[in-house]
Amino acid sequence: MSQPDTSILPIEESFAIVERWRTVGPTEEERNDFIKRASAVVIDSDMVNEFLKKVSEVGKLGGRIDQIMCRLAVQMIWLLPNHWVMVVLVPEWKDFRMRYRDTMTTSMVTAESIRSILREFDAVYLAQVQNIQTEQDRLNAMAKMEYFISELEQWDKSQVVMRELLELKRDIDAFVAKFTVSMKQNVIAPLTSDIEAIDAEIIAAHNSIGILGGSGILRALELGAKASNVIASLQYHRDKKAEALKEVRRAVTLLNELVAPLEKARPKGKSTELPLPDIDAMLEDLVVFGEIWSAVSASETSHNLSITDRDWDGQIRSQTVQFNKILGRGLEAATNTGFKLQVKLAREVCTPLINGLTEYAEQVWSWLSIPPWG
């Protein structure tokens, strides 16, 4: 794990500093130093490339989940003619897949909307705040920021995507449990019993012929099925049931790994390989976007603001409100070094976020544009 470029402090000293920050806040020098260091990290090309790589993988993972959901639907349809229980389960699973695609469409549209908001926030509003020199500049910037705040209040889609994914995950978990129990009771157990019964008949047939010591050698060399149409018929029906059992077990395994993948099932070797697609992993990787989305329409929290305000939470709407309150204190506050550094950092943060949201939307569209049953 990488370490910061400053020396590591003893734990007691770290606790003491945090307690001082909690009580009276960091000094202006501490805050400005933090902002400068954060700014250096944000513009670091390696950091930005790593972020974009992760974003790209999230979008691709979404497509892999869609593919496995489609594959499971096909397997369920294959089971349908011989297993009546699938009549109910197949439509339910197809509905889950369409809900998933609808939610990912919403996530893509949301990402594109926030990208536009961030561009406007950076190029129009923060740029004007950053370039304040005169009293008229300050008043113009305040008017612009107030308009932007009112626009954000009309935009309230921050939690839609995460809520829909979580609800879908909950419903799929319940479906998988129901599907597993149903398959074991209504399909796996009867098929296993049938196979055991046919095996017994095949052994009895070999033993009845009574040559080469009974069934062992005959079965090992597959002579019985080749020499007797009776045994060949039994073997044929046994193989058909075994294949059906294999398909059912494969569907059950895939469903369970979709919601709770086994560690041993994850690919090993090359670092570029991604884990098997599963909804839990998707939710974990989408957290970063959930935070960005929730940032757009987050309600303003109650803060006792100062130029070196210690509660800057990075949320677009509340940050805009905070900046505007600082502008309201006069030209001196609006041109304060610490405030200017905060605005500069806010602008620098916008760039990787905009690029990340663009990459995410493009990756999701690359598989969403393919017809669901194409």
Image: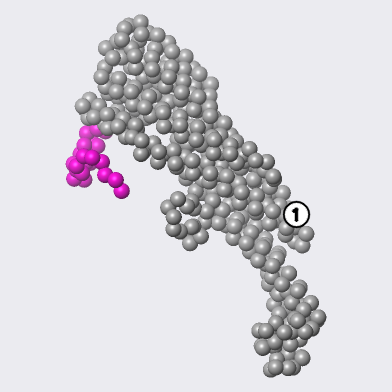
Would residue 29 appear left or right of 52 to someone viewing this image?
A: left
For the residue pair 34 and 158, the one nearer the viewer reads as 34
Q: Position of residue 225 (x, y in %)?
A: 75, 81
Q: Hey, which quadrant is residue 197 in on the image?
A: bottom right
Q: Is residue 21 magenta?
A: yes
Quick check: 226 above or below 247?
A: below
The residue drawn where x is 54% and y is 34% is 361
Q: Write down the region rendered in magenta.
A: 1-23
The residue drawn where x is 49% and y is 44% is 57
Q: Hey, which quadrant is residue 142 in on the image?
A: top left
Q: Hey, which quadrant is residue 314 in on the image?
A: top left
The quarter of the picture where the C terminus appears is top right
Q: Position of residue 367 (x, y in %)?
A: 60, 41
Quick check: 54 above or below 238?
A: above
The residue drawn where x is 72% and y is 49% is 91
Would residue 66 appear left or right of 346 to someone viewing this image?
A: right
The residue that disc 1 covers is 87
Mark 1, secondary structure of its residue: helix
Would residue 98 appear left or right of 231 to someone viewing this image?
A: left
